[in-house]
Image: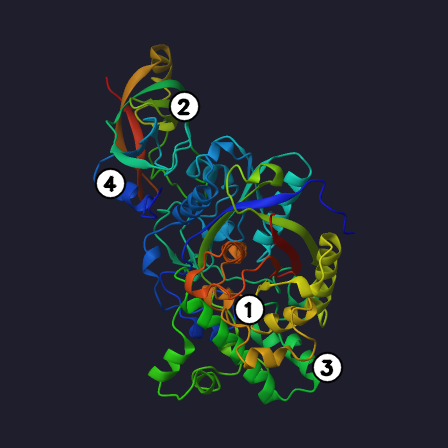
Amino acid sequence: MSNKYLRSVSIIGVGDIRQGTSNLDPVAQAKSYAFGAEQGSHTPELEDLSMFEMFAYSAQEAMKDANINPQQIDQLVYSNVANISSAGMTLGCHPTLLDWAGMHGKASMHIETACASSFVSFQSAVNDIASGRYDIVMVASTEFSQQAFLPWGRADKLVPIKENGLNWSVAPAVYGPAYQKFNGGVTSMPGTFEHPKSYMDDYGLSFNQIDETLNSIVISTRHNASLNPKAFLQTTYEQIAKEAGFSSAQEYLMSEKHNPHLNPYFRALHNCPHCNGAGAVILCASDIAKQFNKKPIEVLSTGISCLTQYNYRSQQRMNREAFAQAYEMAGVRPEEIDLLMCTDMMASEQLESAESCGYLPKGEGWKYFIDGRTRCDGDKPINTHGGDLSAGHAYGSAGMPFYAELVRQMRGQCGSRQVKNLPRTTMLRGFGGGHTTVASIFRTLD
Amino acid sequence: MYNGKPILKKFYDALEDGKLLGMKCTECGNVEFYPVPTCNKCGCLDMEWVELSGDAIVKELVLVNPSPNLYGRDIYNGHGEFGNGVVQLKEGPEYYGMVVGITKENINDYIEKLPFAVKFEKFKIADVDSVAWRPVD
């Protein structure tokens, strides 16, 4: 089903806040290969901020970007995974968030589809405008993935979620492991191997080649993040390697001490750091978009596919379906894509998605990563903001940095990480556990 | 535009010191309580902190006799019954507020006196200082 929108919809404003947490060490977390991991580092900009401040900052930044008064916005579509457990056991907090955004009494809803929540919320908002029901909708989210405030406690007093008796799980909690069959889920590393193994099977790569490829993805993405002041982790692997006494980033990332294998295919740092985040996107009918922002970005299409995570190559199957829908609906060909943005909770998602949507040639994409061609200064840029791998992954807010970045890239606002040729057409592939895959194509509105 | 500095922490810390804070719109003068960084009256993104007088009136009132097991623990720390009132602050905002000093013996007297004046005081809910209102008389 790839019916076109009944009317055109465009993005007129984006906002986000630096992602991070007050204490989270990505290596320790990845080693534990599960949510609610050991923690360590610190993001000073977020000190003493609750989910409400992070939400409000992002929403206001998007409003300012769109040059819009919040009371002109018809609806808030809010996404969040964790507030039942990380925000004081709160149910239905979206009307409260309306007040923080100056939208008291407006329509609002809360969408949860695991880490695809913000991508699905975006689709819902686009549909609401395309149908004619609303003219202007804000998609926004805030997520505290690793910290919580306790029921009846101060909302600014955060504790690790483990202290609230919590631990995240996408897979086993659905039914329990006996019924569901064993599968570690999307970011539970020991159980996840389908991307690299199937790629090796299909194209004959060695373990060393796939290892070098995944490390290269991590290195390039961190390079991009080093140029993004809103990224969670900004220190390049070249610098980290040098400080640890290694001659190169690749050598550092092949060290079992610093980047241990979690299964034969994946190492710890091939996984993303989980963090807190927030963001907002303001959408409106394209025929009024330029009243607000002179550089609207049109949403040409959205494809979506959902599959349980029981089955081998489920992510590949969803990618094929979602990309096909998006291309057919938009009437766009793969060679027209100038920039690819792609959920990369695991490094291998970049490889699979780039080849699946035709951005990189099948069976050859791994060489592009090793050659650094997917960096923001390369000829095939991917995740120029740092992706989940370095900008950080904030569950129900995970899509927001992707929307903000693609809009800023298409407007030419990204400074030192701006891609060489101003992108006119961008593909975004969002993904979340369960599983859900959303593919959207964007084009600068003429 | 909101600068991204802590709001809840500043509010809670002030409350512990016995001060009641709100935020005031720099455009239209609307006061938001509880404090939020965007004006819900005119949509302005620029708000400033304001210390509230602690003076208010109660416009509607019911008696609440909370079950100690309602939330799995007695968050009212053995306080027992109190009033739930529509409280309008002197600065304008109106909201549901806790009115202490209301009992089943005096509730009807206070209902007859509506609206009546109240003054802000701290009240501990669970382990956190919260906002309550006590009749002035």
Residue under mark 4: which chain is it in? B
Q: Earlier in the sequence, mark 2 or mark 4?
A: 4
Residue B127 in sight here: no
Amino acid type, mark 1: Pro
SS of the residue under disc 3: helix
- Horizontally, residue A114 falls left or right of residue A44, namely right
Tag in front: 3 or 4: 3
Residue under mark 3: which chain is it in? A
* Label 1 to label 2: alpha-carbon separation: 64 Å
Q: Residues within 10 Å of mark 4 (few under 14, many from 20)?
A: some
Amino acid type, mark 2: Leu
Q: To which residue does mark 4 refer?
A: B14
Q: To which residue does mark 1 refer?
A: A381
Compared to residue A410, the image places residue A40 above or below, namely: below
Amino acid type, mark 4: Ala
Q: Residues within 10 Å of mark 1 (few under 14, many from 20)?
A: many
Q: To which residue does mark 3 refer?
A: A202
Cβ atoms under marks 3 and 4 closer than 8 Å = no
